[in-house]
Every structure is written in C-alpha cells, then in structure tokens.
Amino acid sequence: MYADTHAYFVYILAISKNGAIYTGMTNDLQRRLWEHKNNENPRSHTAKYNIHRLEYYEVFDTPSEAIEREKFLKKQTRKY
C-alpha cells in the first residue's frame, strides 16, 4: 500500500433523529468531526444549529466520486 493513498468521506451529521442535518465531504473525517464538535467556524450551519452527531458516512477512492455522492445526497434530503 502506498503512503499517498487517500480516502474521501461523505458524511451526514444530525442534531436528533428528525432534526436539522448537515451533509459534507472531507479527506480527513476525524479532523472534520473535531472541527464541527468544537465549532471551529462559529458562523457555520453546524455551529448555529448545534449539529454534531455523526449519523452516517461513506468512503470513496477519489474526490470526484465523493463530490458526486455528496451532491446526490443533498438533493435527496431536500426532496422530503
């Protein structure tokens, strides 16, 4: 396995079962979750609505695959 091997993550955070959600994409899921939980960007959607609980994630080999999936999931969540 190469040292340059990267994974790309699409994830969904939620405040509660039927509450506000956030869908995002990153290449470092652990770091990104830490940023959300610690409100690194106080003006963000997740900070504003206190959305910090990881509900779901998927792993991809390329950023383009992850971006495509993120866009698909965002469209789906807005349908309901």
Image (cartoon, rainbow, N blue to C red):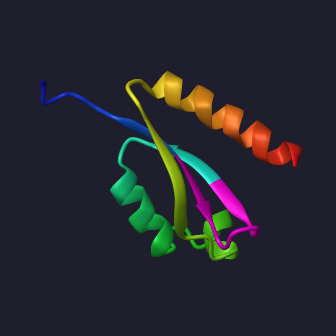
Residue at x-position 51% and y-position 23%:
64
Q: Is residue 23 magenta?
A: no
Q: Is residue 77 above or below residue 20?
A: above
Decide if residue 55 is on the left or right side of residue 63: right
**Rendered residue at 77%/47% (across/down):** 77
Q: Nearer the viewer, residue 77 or 36?
A: 77
State the image coordinates of residue 2 (x, y, percent, origin top left).
13, 24
Q: Is residue 40 visible?
A: no
- 41 to the left or right of 71: left
Magenta-colored stretch includes residue 20: yes
Residue 2, above or below 58:
above
Give the tally of numbered discs: 0
Q: Tell me where residue 1 appears, x and y as whole percent.
A: 12, 25
In the image, taking residue 72 as reference, residue 32 lies left or right, namely left
Place of residue 51 in the rendered image (x, y in percent of width and height, measured from the top left)? 62, 70
Can residue 9 be seen here? yes
Q: Quadrant of residue 14?
A: bottom right
Furthest toward the front, the residue is 17
Instruction: Determine the image quadrant of residue 18.
Output: bottom right
- Segment colored magenta: 11-22
Q: What residue is drawn where x is 51% and y is 73%?
A: 39
Find residue 35 and report its horizontal and vertical position in percent.
44, 65
Q: Residue at 58% across / 73% down in the picture? A: 42
